[in-house]
Image (cartoon, rainbow, N blue to C red):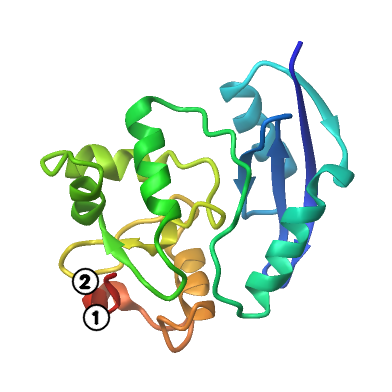
Amino acid sequence: MEKIYYTALETPLGRMWVAASETGLIQFNMTDNKEGFMKELKARIKAEYVEDSSKFKQLRAELECYFRGEKFIFKGPFDMRGTPFQVDVWNAIHSIPNGKLTSYGGIAKQIGRPKAVRAVGNAVGDNPMGLIVPCHRVVSSNGGIGGFSTGLEWKRKLLAHEGILESSEEKPETSLDLRKFFK
């Protein structure tokens, strides 16, 4: 039976949970909810689960760089498990540079499916590696903040950390046009 390794990682935004197969990172949750994390993981992947923090040294170092404000893209390796369409969307999201944004429609065009905007939105919402595959950088085409499966408070925190919002207290969903950050 396949082994999936997991652990909690402490960050400036609190404890987050991560899982990986032998191939690469498979899930990253930004909330400190081990039970919810494990329930979601077990629903997606049938495996033997082993808590082992030693498997995540590279990710821990990359998160430290991210939270110091360095601009880079998480390197992986990744074990993206989804439909081919979802994986295309997640790869496109992964390519969005720190400090930049794109829209759901922009992702649809990038993957060669310009009419699949709603399906892109669903795939973004199903992204199992939030922050690492930075779906918080995907916003509405009108410059509004859009949605976020972990909640808009988290999206605002991450966009403020990346210098897109002045603070996480801003409510761009009602007052700002974020299109100036489109890549």
Could you tell whether 157 is left or right of 67 in the image? left
- Residue 102 image position (x, y, % from top left): 29, 63
Going 17% across and 39% down the picture, which residue do you hit? 113
Is disc 1 placed on a helix, strand or loop?
helix
- Check disc 2 and report the residue beneath it: 143
Screen quadrant of the N terminus: top right
Which residue of the protein is positioned furthest toward the left in this rendering?
Answer: 115
User: Which residue is located at x 52 percent, y 34 percent?
Assistant: 80
Q: Nearer the viewer, residue 156 or 164?
A: 164
Q: What residue sits 28% from the left and 45% below the top? A: 121
Q: Check disc 1 and report the residue beneath it.
A: 180
* Percent x, y of residue 133: 50, 52
**92 relative to 112 in the view: left or right:** right
Left or right relative to 64: residue 168 = left
Above/below status of 45 relative to 94: above
Q: Residue 14: in sight, yes or no? A: no
Mark pair 1, 2: CA separation: 8 Å
Mark 2 is surrounded, within 10 Å at the Cα level, by few (under 14), some (14 to 19) or many (20 or more) other residues, namely many
